[in-house]
Image (spheres, grey):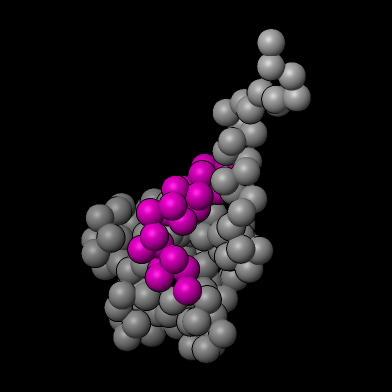
Amino acid sequence: MITGVAKMTHTDFTSRRVVDIEPKMAAFLQEKVNTFIKWDLVRFFHDNPHAMDTAENVARYTGREPDAIQDDLRDLVGTGVLEKEEVAGRSLYRLASDNTMKEMISSFVRACDDRMFRVKAINYVIRAMR
């Protein structure tokens, strides 16, 4: 009989993987990119930093329905990730002009190139959606 060995449950394993994300990145995920739609939107605007477009066009470019992204666009504006401008009665969205936010977004996108980070971030988002 083996003594002193703790049994690790699936929940414990998932929690550990989430916990070891850098605190700044964990806060970014928790407060700003806490849905997969937001993740797609952040990625789209990062990859197209000069884009300024309507929800309908952003939805088309990201392969989503306009109704599905409306709330997440508003949330991203509210948390400072995106900016919204009204032009001729239409809401246009673009990447935030704040350099600190741009750097955080770039750090997030670069981190996503690492498979282990993506796994951790995906688990983090799933837990946040519960």
The magenta stretch spans residue 123? yes
Instruction: Please state the horizontal and vertical placement of residue 46, each as a whole percent of the image.
Output: 37, 75
User: Is residue 44 shown to the viewer in this render?
Assistant: yes
Please give the name of the residue rendered at 56% of the width and 85% of the height, measured from the top-left corner. 100
Q: Residue at x 48, y 82 (%)?
A: 102
Q: Which residues are magenta?
A: 107-130
Our reading of the magenta stretch's main secondary structure is helix
Asked if residue 41 lies left or right of residue 124, the reply is left
103 or 72, which lies in front? 103
Q: Tell me if residue 104 comes above or below residue 72 in the rendering.
A: below
Q: Quadrant of residue 61?
A: bottom left
Residue in view at x 58 percent, y 57 percent:
21
Q: Relative to residue 40, is residue 123 drawn left or right?
A: right
Q: In x, y percent, where is residue 55?
A: 35, 66
Q: Which residue sits furthest front?
A: 1
Q: Position of residue 19 (x, y in %)?
A: 64, 50
Side (left or right) of 79 relative to 74: right
Q: How many marks?
A: 0
Location of the N terminus by quadrant is top right
* Residue 42 in sight: no
Is residue 42 one of those drawn in magenta?
no
* Image position, residue 73 (x, y; %): 46, 65
The front one of 81 and 102 is 102
Q: Image quarter for residue 10? A: top right
- Which image quadrant: the C terminus? top right
